[in-house]
Image (cartoon, coloured by chain):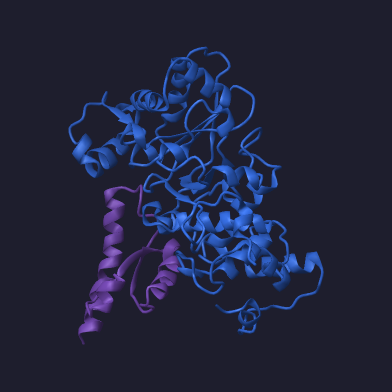
Chain colours: A blue, B purple
């Protein structure tokens, strides 16, 4: 393993700058190494501190990030985590998220370069999410809580600075999304009536996982009136079904992030998560005739000919290929709101668990501390 | 296309002008920096078949020229 000191001896590893926050910010912006917001200067001392919870070789690529296929070594990731404002305890979760994003089913290459406004939504489950302070309650998808802000931001900075997802050249998003600054949540497991996402997917409850989804911005579902499971789910289905969504065309995995009060209404009606998914699959639909004539002819009849070549205009288009493709989590605080998160579509959600090098689940982040 | 080029075949990518920077950057990433990009006007998606034919008419001479150069 190379020491950080040795790595910093390499040409170009260090850039000198006035010891002034504005000067550092100007320099980083001039190089295109920021997200447009001020950053913490990634000095060698700060990078070394950031790596306190890293159990990997510092100079070995953990993943390669397209479209540049830049080598994401722990040192490079740490520099971006410093810039984002991470604590060292956040670092293993940033690294875990990048590992999940690099798995083939996620299609990181496609999601990085596409014109579609997608970005990684990071959904954390398990004890470490709570230990490092990832918000799962009020304003969960909004501002204010550091862990949510900086973990998602660090991932985005890595995608730009290591992967070269630079708007207009490597990231061809037509408009992008404000979620590209950060989109990081934890599931509100304490206030969910069902098994959390990672348990549903076969992980033990004690595991800490990240599930990465190529997400659009969330869309609110306001329902203060429904008193039944069918009522809440009918409102959700109506919000999910829209003609401009990639989920109408691709076999993607959109996310329904239920507020705890909506989830309770559904569960109190006797409905399991699987039954809720089935209902939403059946009811979040769009009659083929609601799409534009050109859309019907060019996309449905030709590109999706196996399903729609001779379909009548009242044929229902579903928002996912099968009920289990829909991801349901419970997150957020008090109130009668839930969120629907459409996705890129041509991407699968990937879930990865946080393990020690000996293969055991990490029960506390401090198990990963060096030395 | 990068793999085809590396196998010695003549290969090229049709690329709209807006995507030329991405195309040339990706050619470098995949180890074929000289991969020919046949430039057409953006966009290619969401246009009529007549407009698609117009773009094909722009790309075809570039392809023929490429074949001549590579075979000479």
On the question of residue A337 being in view, the answer is: no
On the question of residue A305 being in view, the answer is: yes
Front-most of residues A309 and A21: A21
Residue placed furthest toward the bottom: B72
Question: Where does residue A112 sit, x and y in percent of width and height?
Answer: 46, 57
Front-most of residues B41 and A268: A268
Question: Where does residue A120 sit, x and y in percent of width and height?
Answer: 51, 49
**Number of labelled discs?**
0
Question: If the image is split into quadrants, where does the C terminus of chain A sit?
Answer: bottom right
Q: Residue at x 73, y 66 (%)?
A: A41
Q: Residue at x 43, y 63 (%)?
A: B19
Question: If the image is split into quadrants, where does the N terminus of chain A sit?
Answer: bottom right
Q: Is residue A269 above or below residue A99?
A: above
Left or right relative to B1: residue B23? right
Task: Place residue A126 in its image quadrant.
Answer: top right
Front-most of residues A47 and B32: A47
Q: Residue at x 58, y 69 (%)?
A: A76
Question: Where does residue A180 sit, x and y in percent of width and height?
Answer: 57, 50
Task: Place residue A225 in its image quadrant.
Answer: top right
Q: Is residue A174 above or below residue A31?
A: above
Q: Residue at x 62, y 37 (%)?
A: A140
Q: Is residue A37 above or below residue A224?
A: below
Question: Where does residue A165 sit, x and y in percent of width and height?
Answer: 51, 61
Q: Is residue A222 above or below residue A206?
A: above
């Amino acid at each position: 393993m190379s020491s950080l000191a040795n790595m910093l001896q390499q040409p170009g590893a260090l850039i000198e700058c006035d010891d002034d926050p504005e000067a550092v910010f100007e320099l980083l912006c001039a190089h295109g190494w920021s997200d447009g917001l001020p950053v913490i200067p990634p000095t060698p001392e700060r990078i070394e501190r950031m790596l306190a919870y890293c159990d990997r070789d510092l100079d070995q690529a953990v993943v390669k990030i397209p479209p540049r296929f830049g080598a994401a070594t722990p040192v490079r990731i740490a520099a971006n985590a410093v810039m984002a404002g991470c604590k060292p305890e956040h670092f293993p979760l940033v690294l875990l998220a990048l590992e999940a994003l690099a798995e083939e089913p996620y299609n990181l290459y496609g999601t990085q370069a596409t014109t579609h406004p997608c970005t990684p939504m990071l959904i954390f489950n398990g004890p470490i999410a709570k230990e490092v302070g990832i918000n799962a309650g009020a304003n969960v998808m909004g501002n204010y809580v550091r862990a949510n802000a900086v973990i998602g931001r660090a991932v985005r900075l890595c995608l730009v600075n290591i992967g070269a997802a630079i708007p207009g050249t490597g990231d061809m998003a037509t408009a992008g999304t404000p979620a590209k600054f950060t989109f990081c949540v934890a599931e509100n497991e304490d206030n969910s009536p069902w098994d959390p996402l990672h348990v549903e997917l076969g992980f033990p409850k004690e595991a800490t996982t990240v599930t990465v989804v190529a997400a659009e911005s969330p869309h609110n579902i306001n329902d203060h009136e429904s008193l039944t499971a069918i009522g809440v789910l009918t409102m959700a289905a109506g919000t999910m079904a829209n003609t401009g969504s990639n989920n109408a065309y691709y076999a993607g995995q959109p996310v329904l992030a239920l507020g705890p009060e909506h989830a309770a209404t559904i569960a109190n009606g006797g409905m399991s998560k699987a039954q809720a998914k089935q209902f939403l699959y059946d009811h979040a639909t769009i009659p083929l005739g609601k799409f534009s004539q050109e859309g019907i002819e060019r996309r449905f009849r030709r590109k999706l000919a196996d399903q729609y070549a001779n379909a009548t205009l009242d044929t229902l288009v579903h928002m996912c290929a099968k009920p289990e493709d829909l991801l349901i989590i419970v997150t957020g605080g008090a109130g009668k709101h839930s969120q629907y998160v459409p996705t890129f579509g041509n991407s699968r959600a990937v879930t990865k668990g946080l393990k020690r090098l000996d293969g055991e689940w990490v029960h506390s982040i401090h198990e990963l501390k060096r030395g | 296309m990068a793999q085809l080029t590396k196998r010695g075949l003549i290969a090229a990518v049709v690329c709209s002008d807006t995507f030329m920077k991405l195309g040339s950057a990706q050619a470098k990433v995949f180890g074929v920096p000289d991969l020919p990009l046949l430039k057409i006007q953006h966009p290619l998606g969401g246009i009529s078949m007549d407009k698609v034919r117009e773009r094909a008419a722009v790309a075809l001479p570039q392809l023929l020229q490429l074949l001549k150069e590579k075979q000479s």
